[in-house]
Amino acid sequence: MVVWFHGIDIVVLVHSLLIYGRRWTFIFFVLGFSLGLCSEHVGATYGWIFGRFHYQPDRTMFFGTVPVLTPIAWWLIIYCAYNTTNLIFGDLRVLQRNKYRASCALVIMACLDGLMAMNLDMLFDPVMVSPGRERWVWESGGAYFNIPVQNFIGWFLVAFTASLLIRIYDVRKGHFVPLGENLIHYLPVGIYFCMCAGFGLLSYLEGYPQYTLIGFSGMMPFVLWASVRGIFTLKSVRQRRGTPE
């Protein structure tokens, strides 16, 4: 499952290059990777942000504390959330018209991105620390399937921060890419759904249906919301182009 999870990194990278260009892709990757790496290192070293935990020392690590693929996973998850939120909101070029509305919209969109990342971890984390798997260890346990609630607050804050920074960059540079008119725009939403379905199925097969229920109830509303917007957007585009349905 983890191999599959990271195998889609190349697909997402190509998607970003095609849709947003090299400069934006580089900035977003560096931002997501750096925040993911720093937050994980600080968390594993000092117990801040996520709570006190440590990774099993059987993989290649950054600083001896963070697996090398973990910061890439942060970038991937935030990218999928960013695109899903943009599809939900529609044409973001309207943000240039009013600074007050733009500021409110940026915060709301960053909050949605943070919620999407957090909801994914509410499914992902219990699966990965379940008996027999234990990719990392929570040293003091916690209230959510022996995971501290602080961990999920940390996930929200890290994703929120990364999203807000890249969205501020978008507004200041006028970097708005209209999404929804081509099927390729929905690839990140599909990947987010696949993560939900993949880890949900894994948890169900391993005897933890409660994780599956929590994951689907937390993640699927965002997928459905973006999908419904997509159906109407694509229908409108076809009508404008005179394409038969």
Image (cartoon, rainbow, N blue to C red):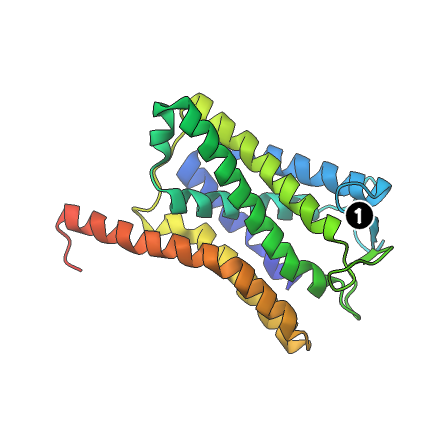
Is residue 40 shown to the viewer in this render? yes
Q: How many labels does the image show?
A: 1
Asked which secondary structure carries label 1, the reply is loop
Crowdedness near tag 1: few (<14), some (14–19) or many (≥20) residues, C-alpha within 10 Å: many
Image x and y of residue 235, in percent? 23, 53
Image x and y of residue 162, in percent? 59, 36
Image x and y of residue 83, in percent? 45, 44
Q: Quadrant of residue 3?
A: bottom right
Is residue 22 shown to the viewer in this render? no
Image x and y of residue 139, in percent? 87, 55
Q: In which quarter of the image is the N terminus?
A: bottom right
The one nearer the camera, 161 or 182, is 161
Relative side of 119 to 80, left or right: right
Residue on which disc 1 sits: 51
Q: Which residue is drawn at 57% across and 66% down?
A: 198
Q: Which residue is drawn at 21% across and 49% down?
A: 236
